Image (cartoon, rainbow, N blue to C red):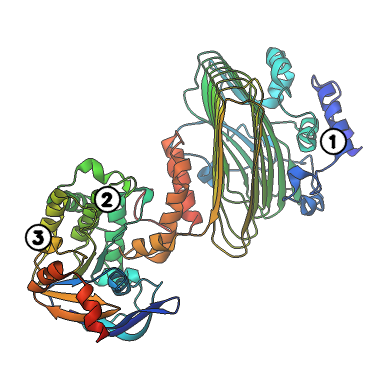
Amino acid sequence: MAFENNVDVEHPVHDVRMAAIKNFEEKGFPSKKEEAWKYTSLNSLQKIDFSIFPKEQNALEYKDVKRYFIHEIDTYKIVFVDGIYSSYLSETTHDGVDICLMSAALTKPMYKQIIDVYFNKIASKDESLTTLNTAFSREGAYIYIPKNKMPKKPIEILHFSTGNEASLLLQPRNLIVVEENAEVQIIERHQSLTSNDTLTNAVTEIFAAKSAIVDFYKIQNDAATASLIDNTYVDQKDKSVVNVHTFSFGGKLTRNNLNFYQNGEYIDSTMNGVTILGEKQHVDHYTLVHHMQPNCESHQDYKGIYSDSSTGVFNGKIIVDKIAQKTNAFQKNNNILISDKASINSKPQLEIFADDVKCSHGCTIGQLDEDALFYLQSRGIPKKEARALLMYAFANNVLSTVRIPELKARINKLIAKKLGVNLGFDL
Amino acid sequence: MLKIKDLHASVDDKEILRGINLEVKAGEVHAIMGPNGSGKSTLASVIAGNERFEVTQGSIELSGEDLEEVSPEERAHKGVFLSFQYPVEIPGVSVTNFMKTAINESRKAKGLEDMPAKDMLKLIREKSELLEIDRKFLSRSLNEGFSGGEKKRNEIFQMAMLEPKVAILDETDSGLDIDALRIVASGVNKLKSKDNAVILITHYQRLLEYIVPDFVHVLHNGKIVKSGGKELALELEEKGYDWLKQETAV
């Protein structure tokens, strides 16, 4: 195989990688025949001849990409350009916490203990795209927050693609370990700066120890030629709180495989999403919460607004093991279809084996309320702005849990922009 | 100020208004009464420009201008205001921000700059005091979780903010206890001037004790079947609407 020259057989995780390659070779890309991929086809992506290893790095100036950062506040930054770390754009630290590079963590002896315990431990060894990443990923963010620590500022992980290659496959790999009573806030964004095709197949493993708090925000507002398959795995211990927000506002095809495993009691897991799509964009939210211990909660709230010929999928799976009594699991998926050509497939999947649980799920698909629209217009608000205001109101619940005000403001602006309006106030 | 001529309107091919004639001059208060289903709320909606209803015949003029092709928002900019019977809840948008947007959109339509924040705050303070509205109330999401009375008071607060030429109050008295009714009515009375007009749509005479009309019209089967002075409302209260059926049957 051509890529063998690029594989370092001496690498500490070589065996893990070889096993992953074997799995991917057996399984290949998932097809629509598989239940989990029924509504999302990767066929068109497979026809593209992606380069796996970029030849050279394109230099980016901060001023050119500043707008993709939450630049109103100070943050740690781990930035990759065409898959390669950009020290120039980044700000890492080893001051009490480790916010640095996966490549360093995988090779330097000082990280070996953590890598041995956590690397590829919660990520699937079976799911083909995850194993494809395990096999070939070289770079990503490594974040280690020791007991009782909290970084001084949020962390941004940014992946830029510059179009240096005709078409580029990126496979970032992140490992985030948050020890007991520690806390971290992370914002992740994939941004293509080119009209060349890019495909990102990302894997993130998050480990939240006892009483740890993790806020993870995913901003997906990519170019029309950029596709993303995001595989995120979360392992939670007693009393930990993990919130993952997914803002899907763009990109050609986006698949979010978001998996939560509750390995303890009194855990809180939140998955919130706002999706606003147009043109021929496609997004597929595929979530799993596995309640494996008693007295835990999970909350899912996904809102979608689909216009033009855009399509969406929400598949929310909740498993409650027999032992997991007193589980509270809530799931909501509400959608507005703006055009006749837009569509959404919404599917809850509940597998409940315990008898003393509260589980609810609800899904709605509708149009904008005409009475509400008239109400706003009758106050002098033009139809376009009135529609935007209603759509904003619709998505608003999901934003109330965003805990970084500047990020919230940014998301609000993105929503307003996406809806094509400039409202008279900061929403 | 508002001139309605032979107005016919229908929804889903069902005719609801069957030839309304009404003229409202500046400084006047008109009450429109009538039994359920007579077309009162439809008339209010049609004046405000609700596109759910189709005007099949006749015209509505505001200060001499035909409103036929005028959108609801443009009617608002020109001074039409409708206080809704069932105001809509808008989560995530505060009363204050909603009013800022409404006022600035209206100013934009008139080619004016946004109202300076200081003036806006002053205006909000004045008008909220007029309706005895708590400041905390203004930062709540619009109508979300409001009681019936709070919603109606908020409607009149919006009217106070927007200072319309013609205000149509659709069943503003329903769902109000006597104290709230008094506050709302006194607010409306303070906003009344020789330059604007008020149309009260109501089922009962109760509101008219507080906001005294110059004219009372009885709507039945989509037509104004009787008009008179304020004493007509008392007569209606006493006799009910049954006599209408007999009278119109003849």
Q: Secondary structure at mark 1?
A: helix
The amino acid pointed to by label 2 is Gly
Against B7, residue B125 (above or below) is above
Q: Residues within 10 Å of mark 3 (few under 14, many from 20)?
A: some
How packed mark 2 is, by other alpha carbons closer than 10 Å (few <14, some 14-19, many 20 or more), is: some
Q: Which structural element holds mark 2?
A: helix
Q: Is residue B143 left or right of residue A202?
A: left
Residue visible at 82% across and 53% down in the picture: A47
* In the image, residue A168 above or below residue A319: below
| Residue at mark 3: chain | B
**Is residue A400 among the parts visible in the rendering?**
yes
Between the residue at mark 2 and the residue at mark 1, the CA separation in whole angstroms equals 61 Å
Spot occupied by residue A257 in the image (x, y as percentages of width and height): 67, 38
As drawn, A328 above or below A62: above
Which residue position is annotated with label 2? B148
Q: Residue at x 82, y 43 (%)?
A: A29
> Where does the image place residue B48, in percent across and percent down from the top left?
30, 71
Q: x%, y% of residue B73?
A: 33, 68
The residue where tag 3 is placed is: B210
Horizontally, residue B244 falls left or right of residue A392, namely left
Q: Chain of mark 2?
A: B
Disc 1: which chain? Answer: A
Cα–Cα gap, marks 2 and 3: 19 Å
Labels 3, 1: one chain:
no
Dot 1 corresponds to which residue? A24
